[in-house]
Amino acid sequence: MNRTLQFAKRNLIELSRDVLGYIFCIAFPILMLIVMSVVNESIPKEAGMMTFRIDNLSGGILIFGQTFVMLFTAILVATDRSTSFLLRLYASPMKSRDFTNGYMFPMILISIVQAIVLMLSSCVVAKISGVELKVGGLLLVILLSIPSAIMFLSIGLIFGSLLNEKSAPGVCSVIVSAGTFLGGVFFDAEGVGGPILKVCNCLPFLYCTRVARSTIQMDFHWETFGKSLLIVSLTAIAMAALAVLTFRSRMKADQ
Amino acid sequence: MKTARKELEKTTGENIKTGKTPVRYQEMWWTIESNLTEKNIIEKNIIEKNIIEKNIIEKNIIEKNIIEKNIIEKNIIEKNIIEKNVIEKNVIEKNVKKKDMEKKGMGKMKNMIVLENLSKNYGVKKAVDDINLTVKEGEMLSLLGVNGAGKSTTIKMLSCLTKPSGGTAKIDGRDVVKERDRVKEIVGISTQDTAIARNLTVEENLSFMAGIYLDPKAFDKKKREERVEEILRDFKLEEVRRTKSGKLSGGWQRRLSIAMAMIGNPKVLLLDEPTLGLDVLARRELWREIEKIKKNRTIILTTHYMEEAEALSDRIAIMIKGKIIMTGTLGELEEKTGQKGLENVFVSVVEGEEKHE
Ligand SMILES: Nc1ncnc2c1ncn2[C@@H]1O[C@H](COP(=O)(O)OP(=O)(O)O)[C@@H](O)[C@H]1O
Ligand SMILES: [Mg+2]
């Protein structure tokens, strides 16, 4: 456990020195929160377009932000694998779980900080646009967004283990776009319906946004909240297990 | 005289023919002439003075140059003497150490590293081909060979970074395949490609390694910090402790890499080409560090620099195309090949091998 924490600390230092990390994981989601709120103001009320209203938007932006945590996990792991530093650590008494947990812990921490910052920003936006946000929902979503965070960073760990440092960012950007689109962050997937909704329902991303949105609105129905949280949690567990296996097998292959 | 005549013409306003100065102007002529002569003498004197001065200055410059050259030469000679002394001291120390070991019964010393029929194949390529090697406790062995000889592959097998295709390797009686975790506890490694976390400072790199290698039961946070300070001091890394390690020069990075390998005070240290790509001064500097950490430690060092193997090691193993051809002290190798100096020994061994094929 001590070695896991030592490695986690190293990774946290490494990430904290990357300015792009702050820009993409914190600044960019806040910017989108503001931009989409402005867009929302200009949509006529009669259109009945609710996706960008802050109580819907903040949940979507939260998931949007988490996709970037995935991207940075992939970059960190892929870059490390290309260096002799990681190879040298394979000769140390570190076990493979020290590596995988050491990558995941700081990412979970970053996701939590990200959720706190985004929810505080949402409060400010809500105040300005005169929409009421429930404090309980905002606090609760910090906790209940952890499963989706684990799912995303596990996907990042998988791509970081499989791809090299050059191709990992590219492939992950595809997931960022797909996750954001098919997760219905910037459009009303339920409203659109049809084949797009069918695809969305087959992938975990829409369930992530549903959990975040319904938690913030404190709407704890089975269909919107319970079922989605269950699906997200199970996917997170499966992805985490897959990530551990992938990293372990790559660790052997890299040697 | 022409000027004197022109002068006379100017003062009298008459046209005076050459050689025929009218008597009435005779006195004036003499005055003008003597004036001119004086002026000439003075001018001549000035020119002569200038020449003399110039000569003196030039002489001074030359003398200064000679003195400077002498000083430089003296410095070079002194430096050479010092270097020679250092090398001689090393040799003497080594001899003393050897004698000590012999007295203590080096023959009875424990075998720390034992390789038996160790092989590693990459596809059809035999990177390491059936090698046998024993390194005794406290001994420093140089694995000498050109690029591609199989040195790094051997080091990787010993540090559990790659699995042998055949044979066995034991470190302090622990098998590198079956007892990986127990081997990792006692082996420190500095890989050929400098393995450091480039975004972390020197101090952070060392703290991280301390956290990985030091048993938290025996070393609490304070003791770990003390150990980091100790290593920073030992390897003279204090002045760069807060520098990001990726920004250090090659020499400093190597030094950090070895310092990181030393943090757990390992019984066995594996150094893969520690001075590769360093300039002469940085190499000498690193040799001194390696000399310091030799005490009570078993070390395998790989190198393709003859003088490095000669300067640092107790014994030398010559590796060619995956095979260890000859092992022994420099003296023993010289005796076996009938050559003087490691370079000649090495060349004769390589040529002997080529004939063999
Ligand atoms: N991972 C690998 N895959 C294939 N061939 C390798 C690998 N590592 C080393 N080799 C080959 O094995 C031989 C020995 O390499 P190495 O041990 O690195 O030599 P040295 O360290 O003495 O320069 C070389 O011919 C090299 O090309
Ligand atoms: Mg090598």
Image (cartoon, coloured by chain):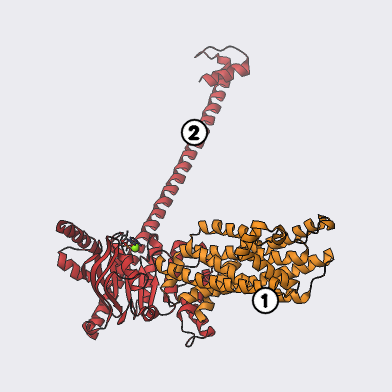
Q: State the orange chain.
A: A
* Chain of the residue displaying label 1: A
- Residue B44 is tagged as 2
Question: Disc 2 on helix, strand or loop?
Answer: helix
Which quadrant of the structure image shows residue B163? bottom left
Which quadrant of the structure image shows residue A68? bottom right
* Closest to the observer, B258 or B167: B167
The outermost residue toward the front is: A194
Colour of chain B in the rendered structure image: red
Neighbourhood count class around disc 1 (C-alpha, 10 Å): few under 14, some 14–19, many 20 upward: few
User: What separation in Å lies between label 2 and label 1 (alpha carbons)?
Assistant: 104 Å
The answer to whether B243 appears left or right of A84 in the picture is right
Give residue A195's position: percent from left, percent from top: 64, 57
Q: Are marks 2 and 1 in contact (CB under 8 Å)?
A: no
User: Where in the image, quadrant-wise, is ligand 2 located?
Assistant: bottom left
What is the tally of numbered marks visible in this picture? Answer: 2
Q: Amino acid at mark 2?
A: Lys
Using the image, determine if residue A124 lies above or below residue B23: below
Q: Amino acid at mark 1?
A: Leu
- Residue A95 is tagged as none
| Front label number (2 vs 1) | 1
**Mark 1 residue CB less than 8 A from any atom of ligand 1:** no
- Examine the rendering and report whether any part of residue B203 can be seen: no
Give residue B57's position: percent from left, percent from top: 47, 45
Give residue B22's position: percent from left, percent from top: 55, 13
The answer to whether B331 appears left or right of A232 in the picture is left
- Examine the rendering and report whether any part of residue B83 can be seen: yes
* Chain of the residue displaying label 2: B
Q: Which residue is mark 1?
A: A143
In the picture, the quarter occupied by the C terminus of chain B is bottom left
